[in-house]
Image (cartoon, grey):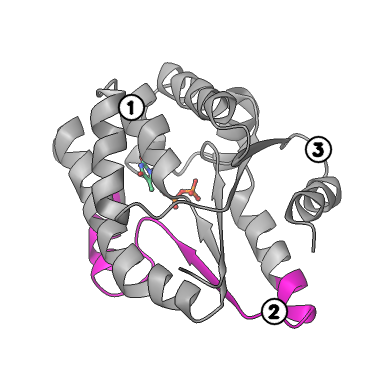
Amino acid sequence: MSKGLFITFEGGDGCGKTTQIKLLDEYLRAKGYQTLLTREPGSKGLGVKLREILLNYDGEVSPVCESFLFLADRAQHVDCIIKPALENGTIVLCDRHTDSTVAYQGYGRGLDLNQIHNLNKIATSGLKPDLTVVLDVDVETSQKRVGAEKDRMESAGIEFFERVRQGFLEIAKQEPERVKVVDSTQSIEEIHKQILELIGR
Ligand code: TYD
């Protein structure tokens, strides 16, 4: 049994996760908690190499290959970084995790959702976040935030990002206990306040 707390942040590109996760990390540290801020894909080591391929490879990548690369990164991340930290009593804050594969490769690329759920289970050996915060923002706003310089994933079309957004909202509907949606068109301070209420610390 893990002693720590596992919190994941999810949402479309440009939803403001990175800003919010940093604010929460600073808040928890100031309160004396031991935290680990990490991300998928590519927190460190092998994952950094996988991230490089996933975001920058400029040749054709099949949706199934793409899924396996995200899942390979996840398996390594869970076993070598997340689980040891949780066993140590650390609060793990993870920028993207299993729900991103469901939303992007499942809803976005159209791969079979059941298969993705099963593959996620293998990659995580069944570990589930205690809480998942989905930062929801309309696609137009998120595209503006991402700007003109786009990586391989960010270069997918508007329709793709609409499906990804609906995917995250659907996940939240299916698992309302674990997954909480926060309106990310609000101010940074307001979003942070709502996240603290969800965390209850
Ligand atoms: P990143 O630069 O970390 O984007 P962000 O700051 O928006 O989190 O790039 C990660 C990209 O990879 C992002 O476009 C979402 C995508 N992704 C998937 O498609 N599937 C996954 O399982 C994960 C973890 C990420």
Front residue of this view, candidates 79 and 68: 79
For image coordinates 38% across by 23% down, the residue present is: 107
- Expressed as whole percent of the image width and height from the top left, the position of residue 9 reads 57, 50
Q: Which residue lies furthest to the top in this view?
A: 159
Residue where numbered disc 1 is placed: 106
Q: Residue 186 carries which label?
A: 3
> Would residue 22 appear left or right of 86 to someone viewing this image?
right
> How far apart are labels 1 and 2 at the CA level?
35 Å
Label 3 packing within 10 angstroms: few (<14), some (14-19), many (20+): few
Membership of 48 in magenta stretch: yes
Image quarter for residue 66? top left
Q: Which of marks 2 and 3 is nearer the N terminus?
A: 2
- Expressed as whole percent of the image width and height from the top left, the position of residue 19 reads 66, 57
Front residue of this view, candidates 177 and 53: 177
Q: What stretch is highlighted in magenta?
A: 26-54
Question: Against 136, is 53 above or below?
Answer: below
Q: Disc 3 on helix, strand or loop?
A: loop
Q: Disc 1 on helix, strand or loop?
A: helix
- Expressed as whole percent of the image width and height from the top left, the position of residue 125 reads 29, 55
Tag 3: residue type? Gln
